Image (cartoon, rainbow, N blue to C red):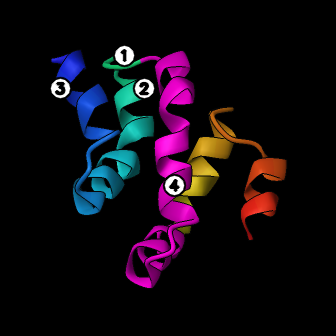
Amino acid sequence: MQHIFKELLISEDYRIRLDSWDRVTDLIDKGIISNEEAIEKKEYFKELLISEDYRIRSSAWYMIIIVKRLIDKGIMNNEEVTDMI
């Protein structure tokens, strides 16, 4: 089961990937994946935030609560987020 969730975090389909990252902190809290595993995959979320495709980028930033949750869990930091703005 863990393998499936980790694969969804790096999905080529941005909608699936964004939806998965929206749930990542819940998955961590339930012990389905670890904080370290999310940190290893965070570049895939960052790709959504800086995508050249406006639809993808705006969808990711629209869900800014995801970014806050990732910062709260120590998966991302303020400097990383600031660099992408």
Position of residue 82 relative to residue 69, above or below, is below
The range drawn in magenta is 34-63
Residue that carries the numbered disc 4 in the rendered image? 47
Amino acid at pointer 1: Gly
Classify mark 2: residues with Cα within 10 Å, few (<14), some (14-19) or many (20+): some
Residue that carries the numbered disc 1 in the rendered image? 31
Mark 1–mark 2 contact, CB under 8 Å?
yes
Residue that carries the numbered disc 2 in the rendered image? 28
Badge 1 element = loop
Question: In the rendered view, does 52 fall on the left or right side of 77?
Answer: left
Badge 2 element = helix
Q: Earlier in the sequence, mark 3 or mark 2?
A: 3
Classify mark 3: residues with Cα within 10 Å, few (<14), some (14-19) or many (20+): few
Amino acid at pointer 2: Ile
Q: Which numbered mark, 2 or 4, is in the foreground of this view?
A: 4
Question: In the rendered view, does 26 fall on the left or right side of 5?
Answer: right
Q: Main secondary structure of the magenta part?
A: helix
Q: Earlier in the sequence, mark 3 or mark 4?
A: 3
Mark 3–mark 2 contact, CB under 8 Å?
no
Q: Quadrant of the N terminus?
A: top left
Q: Which numbered mark, 3 or 2, is in the foreground of this view?
A: 3
